[in-house]
Structure formats: C-alpha cells, structure tokens
Image: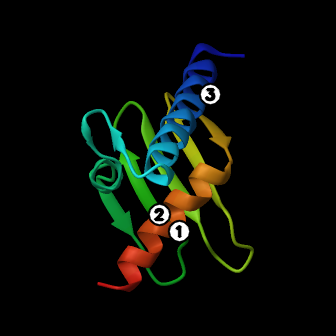
Amino acid sequence: MSNATEQARETAVHTRELLEDIWEAIDQGGEYEDTDAVDYLGELPLEVVWEVGEPFAVVLGTGGPHVEITGGGRSGGYALTVYWGGAEATVYGDAIDRTGEYFRDMYENM
C-alpha cells in the first residue's frame, strides 16, 4: 500500500470515528469539545453541494486531504471518501449516513 493510500485510509477512518463521537454526544444530549454537539456538527462542513445530476455532497476538508461525504440517492446511504496525493479511500458507517442525512435535511429545509 502506498504512503498516500495509507494516509487517505487513516484519515477516512479517523474522520468516521470523529463523527461517531459527535453523534454519541448528540444522542446523549451533551457537548463535544466543550461545545454543544449539534452546533459542533453544524460547523464541520466547508461546503454543502447539490447540483442537478450530481450526488449530494458535504465537503469537510479540501487540499491535502480532500474529505467529503456523498450519496443519499435512490440507493440511499452515504460514503465518506478521502482523496490524498492521487490516492483515495472510502469508508461507510451509521455516523456517516446520519451526517449525510442531517445536512441533506438541513439543505432541503432552507
């Protein structure tokens, strides 16, 4: 496995774990990093993108690495993908689905 692939994979797993921790705090009605957990979640995205013919996307980071959650189409579910130095890694999970759904609902209700 190349260094870029390994970095992308580690970042993807770390980001999924971060989202799991945030959702655990939300479910308990508490705080994350000394901030209301829902407010903390709401501050994560750099951009929310939904263009005709494209999947819904929540951009969490750009540059090195680029991190985004995409999906929510007919097949449902979301994926978190990290792009780093020409490599990419994708992970899935309940916290990723919940995050995608949260921001899609927010976007639809604007």
Q: Which of marks 1 and 2 is in front?
A: 1
- Dot 1 or dot 2: first in sequence order is 2
Which of the 4 image quadrants contains residue 74? bottom right
Callout 2 environment at 10 Å: few (<14), some (14 to 19), or many (20+)? many
Give the residue at x 47% y 84%: 52
Residue 18: image x %, image y %? 48, 35
Q: Can residue 62 be seen in this view?
A: no
Q: What residue type is labelled 3?
A: Arg
Residue 26: image x %, image y %? 44, 51
Which residue corresponds to mark 3? 9
Callout 3 environment at 10 Å: few (<14), some (14 to 19), or many (20+)? many
Image colouring = rainbow
Q: Can residue 42 be seen in this view?
A: yes
Residue 35: image x %, image y %? 24, 42
Quadrant including the C terminus: bottom left
Which residue corresponds to mark 1? 101
Q: Is residue 46 above or below residue 24?
A: below
Q: Is residue 77 above or below residue 54?
A: above
Give the residue at x 66% y 16%: 2
User: Position of 76 compared to 37: left or right?
Assistant: right
Secondary structure type for disc 1: helix
- Dot 2 or dot 3: first in sequence order is 3
Q: Which amino acid does label 2 sit on?
A: Ala
Count of marks placed on residues = 3
Pick whichever, 55 or 87, lies toward us. 55
Which of the 4 image quadrants contains residue 53? bottom right
Q: Nearer the viewer, mark 3 or mark 1?
A: 1
Which residue corresponds to mark 2? 57
- Rounded to the nearest angstrom, the CA distance separating label 2 from label 3 is 19 Å
Residue 9: image x %, image y %? 62, 28
Q: Is residue 66 above or below residue 71?
A: above
